[in-house]
């Protein structure tokens, strides 16, 4: 089953469609609670045996908490529930009444090592208030004292649509039901490890209107193996145009990423002063100075290469725009446009569209580059990150990969996929150049900009996760990410253990 990314309203609508189709709402609650209890026992077996505290809110999320309490009690685990506010729904009251006789006749005493957050669900909005806010503060305080916090569906107080997280629970593990919520991907640090649980929504999730979450298994199914009889020509030739004076590092990083992603040979085309620099730093690559005529573009690029990455470290000037226009006018093969090759077209999407039209093309802007190109503010980009790429993809007639947390990829037909892999180790200068090298390699080999973008985003993020594992973010440099790419391509993906549909690692210093 695929995993879709929803707003709060879309998640609620999916539940309603399932209920209207004949699945009792209480059955969904029971599935969610029982599966959550199983995950808690599986992931924290020793801590669970020492008792679990459950903070139950007044809505159906509180009902999920009562189901968890009953399921834990059924296998001999002491589950103590603190009911915060009167239960408002019939399903939640029925679950409480059905299990309360199995539980200790006392509230949590403060010694439990696991705290289950069932205060607020996906539909809650606005800052937490009153008793709920006090309950959230208590949960977070218990976490600072060493307890592990498990949130049901979403950390209480986190806006499921916008990711606003002021006053929310900070979870170590979030068990979310049926779909991933947008806010969870934006506020990853509040969710900890994010696990998507199948509660039987199935076809009742509207596949056509919601972005698809893509992961390593999705990417692996779309990246072809390199066969035993392959040679460098089969693996293809990539040209990287960039490297203005003082910026030789960008194309070098892109070249290294391309080589670690399976390209056969790279040609670096850089400012004349940087030819010797890149030749000595990227010894496996060829190097040439920027072309100064159409004939040089034809000879050095068109007749030699299979794919093009243009932009890393290029510089933003009238001269570099002339260079980009010359190259893109003559080069008609697959192309990835990044960094300064986008900046030179700030506010001029028509010119870029005319140069890109008619071939597999991918642009890879970060929010600042996107805002300059599209003529909007960075705040607008971030507030509408899941939709905003669609209009630019249509206008440019190419695939748009909007970098960030998460990475959102949209093609001209409106298809949207999202990669949530990655950690803050990728928030460093040069990380985009690494992504560009991966994406250009995959586009050159597949000819499919949408697939190449999705696979590159997943691989880039996964390399960051592997490099981060066991290290603080401050201790990891991009060289570690490049080295980790070799492990990304070798990973095996045996499939998810039911009822888990997807799982995202905790980002940052405490990668687990």
Image (spheres, rainbow, N blue to C red):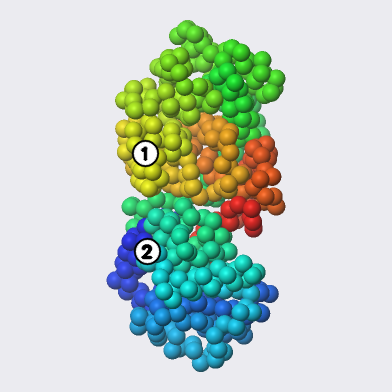
Q: Quadrant of the N terminus?
A: bottom left
Callout 1 environment at 10 Å: few (<14), some (14 to 19), or many (20+)? some
Q: How many numbered badges does the structure rendering display?
A: 2
**Residue picked out by circle 2:** 126
Looking at the rendering, which quadrant does residue 119 occupy? bottom left
- Image quarter hosting the C terminus: bottom right
Q: Give the percent coordinates (x, y) of residue 468.
A: 65, 48
Image height of 400 relative to 182, above or below: above
Say which element carries label 2. Answer: loop
Q: Nearer the viewer, residue 54 or 294?
A: 54
Q: Is residue 452 above or below residue 356?
A: below
Q: Which mark is residue 377?
A: 1
Q: Nearer the viewer, residue 103 or 155?
A: 155
Q: Answer above or below: position of 372 versus 292.
A: below
Q: Which mark is residue 237?
A: none
Residue 410 seen by the camera: no
Q: Earlier in the sequence, mark 1 or mark 2?
A: 2
Q: Quadrant of residue 510?
A: bottom right
Residue at 58% from the left image edge and 38% from the top image edge: 428
339 above or below 414? Answer: above
Q: In terms of depth relative to the viewer, which is nearer, 41 or 372?
A: 372
Which x, y percent locates residue 260? 64, 34
Percent coordinates x, y for residue 149 in the rendering: 57, 69
Residue lying at 42% horizontally and 30% vertically, measured from the top left: 361
In the image: residue 368, left or right of residue 78: left
């Amino acid at each position: 089953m695929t995993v879709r990314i929803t707003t709060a309203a879309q998640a609620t609508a999916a539940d309603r469609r399932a209920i209207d189709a004949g699945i009792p709402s209480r059955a969904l609650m029971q599935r969610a609670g029982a599966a959550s209890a199983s995950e808690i026992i599986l992931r924290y077996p020793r801590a669970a045996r020492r008792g679990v505290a459950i903070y139950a809110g007044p809505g159906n999320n509180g009902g999920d908490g009562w189901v968890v309490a009953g399921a834990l009690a059924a296998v001999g685990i002491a589950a103590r529930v603190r009911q915060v506010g009167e239960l408002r729904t019939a399903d939640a009251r029925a679950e409480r009444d059905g299990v309360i006789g199995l539980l200790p006749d006392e509230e949590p005493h403060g010694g439990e090592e696991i705290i289950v957050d069932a205060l607020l669900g996906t539909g809650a909005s606005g800052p937490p208030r009153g008793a709920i806010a006090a309950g959230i503060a208590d949960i977070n305080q218990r976490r600072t004292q060493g307890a592990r916090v498990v949130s049901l569906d979403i950390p209480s107080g986190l806006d499921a649509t916008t990711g606003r997280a002021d006053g929310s629970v900070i979870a170590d593990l979030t068990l979310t039901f049926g779909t991933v919520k947008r806010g969870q991907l934006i506020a990853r640090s509040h969710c900890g490890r994010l696990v998507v649980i199948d509660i039987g929504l199935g076809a009742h999730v509207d596949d056509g209107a919601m972005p698809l979450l893509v992961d390593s298994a999705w990417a692996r199914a779309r990246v072809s193996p390199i066969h035993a009889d392959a040679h460098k020509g089969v693996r293809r030739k990539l040209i990287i145009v960039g490297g203005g004076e003082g910026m030789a590092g960008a194309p070098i990083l892109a070249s290294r990423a391309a080589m670690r992603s399976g390209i056969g040979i790279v040609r670096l085309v850089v400012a004349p002063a940087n030819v010797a620099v890149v030749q000595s730093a990227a010894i496996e690559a060829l190097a040439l100075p920027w072309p100064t005529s159409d004939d040089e573009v034809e000879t050095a690029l068109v007749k030699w290469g299979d794919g093009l990455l243009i932009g890393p470290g290029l510089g933003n000037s009238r001269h570099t725009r002339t260079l980009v226009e010359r190259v893109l006018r003559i080069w008609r093969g697959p192309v990835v446009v990044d960094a300064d090759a986008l900046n030179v077209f700030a506010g001029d999407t028509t010119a870029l569209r005319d140069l890109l039209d008619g071939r597999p093309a991918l642009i890879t802007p970060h929010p600042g580059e996107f805002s300059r190109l599209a003529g909007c503010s960075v705040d607008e980009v971030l507030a509408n990150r899941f939709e905003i790429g669609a209009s630019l993809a249509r206008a440019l007639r190419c695939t748009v990969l909007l970098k960030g947390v998460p990475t959102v990829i949209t093609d001209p037909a409106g298809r949207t996929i999202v990669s949530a892999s990655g950690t803050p180790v990728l928030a460093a200068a040069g990380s985009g150049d690494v992504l560009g090298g991966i994406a250009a390699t995959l586009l050159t080999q597949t000819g499919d900009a949408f697939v190449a973008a999705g696979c590159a985003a997943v691989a880039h993020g996964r390399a960051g996760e592997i490099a981060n594992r066991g290290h603080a973010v401050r201790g990891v440099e991009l060289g570690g990410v490049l080295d980790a790419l070799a492990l990304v391509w070798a990973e095996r993906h045996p499939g998810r253990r039911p009822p888990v549909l997807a799982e995202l690692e905790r980002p940052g210093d405490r990668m687990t």
